[in-house]
Image (cartoon, helix red, strand yellow):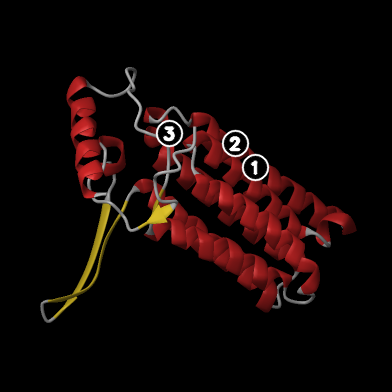
Amino acid sequence: MFISAEPIIRRKQHALDFQDRQGLLRLKLEISDKTLFNNVYTRIDQVFVVWGLITAIIFFTAQFAPINWITQAFFWSALTSIGTIGMAVLTYFWVKVERLRWVLYSWIILMLGGVVITDLGILQGWSSVLMNLCQLWLGLSAIGYFCTGWGLRSRAFMIEGIFHVLGRSVLPFCIGWQFLVTGLVMTANLLVFAETQWDMRLPIENYDVLTEEQKEFNREQYLIRQAES
């Protein structure tokens, strides 16, 4: 069930559950005792940042760098594989606690499947693939966001999936700039998710992973978040 009373997206909350605090990264920038930037990044946020950088590098390179397709295929495959491995390592404990391993596996299948199709299209000269690489990756990302939205019961991710589908429909009007547009769409939205708090279902009791102390800690954090909202 989707929680309609919760904002779709809002400023980050700092009362985090046990699984969110693992590998937490805190960034603070101060100049003359004045705080210019102060935020925390969970491992999920870190995955968004990593994928944001990867998509920017891949699609902006494809748009502006005079590199042949074979070299780019190798380049894309390496970066996407690194991103997929990093995603699995960073998120596995979290998805295990949240009982969302199927969402992680879905993303892995989508990303590696996309790499295989892309590489075969380039190496075999399949025009149907080469002419629709941007549509392919926006479509795969949309499926991933829909899976994530359903698993988390998150309207934010569902909307993101729709946004990627709409991005595919805009591409025919961006002849000559499709890679740039695709990169901007994918990168911008990933970074937005990294910098904000998105809606999701209520916390669950996981009897297989967390200890009683950890579960009690999560209950206390939930009450704090409710009081702050």
Q: Is residue 190 left or right of residue 30?
A: right
Which residue is depicted at the point 32% across and 17% down? Answer: 207
Q: Are marks 2 and 1 in contact (CB under 8 Å)?
A: yes
Tag 2 residue: 106
Q: Which residue is mark 3?
A: 95
- Binning the other alpha carbons within 10 Å of mark 3 as few (below 14), some (14 to 19) or many (20 upward) gives some
Q: Amino acid at mark 3?
A: Val
State the residue position of label 1. 110
- Residue 80: x %, y % from top left: 58, 52
Q: Is residue 150 above or below residue 114?
A: above
Local SS, label 1: helix
Amino acid at pointer 1: Leu
In this view, the residue farthest toward the bottom is 32
Mark 2 vs 3, N-terminal side: 3
Please state which of residues 52 and 169 is positioned toward the viewer in this rendering: 169
Please determine whether, in this image, residue 216 is positioned above or below residue 227: above
Q: How dense is the environment of label 1, judged by Cα within 10 Å: few (below 14), some, or many (20 and up)?
A: some
Q: CA distance from mark 2 to mark 1?
A: 6 Å
Q: Residue at x 41, y 57 (%)?
A: 194
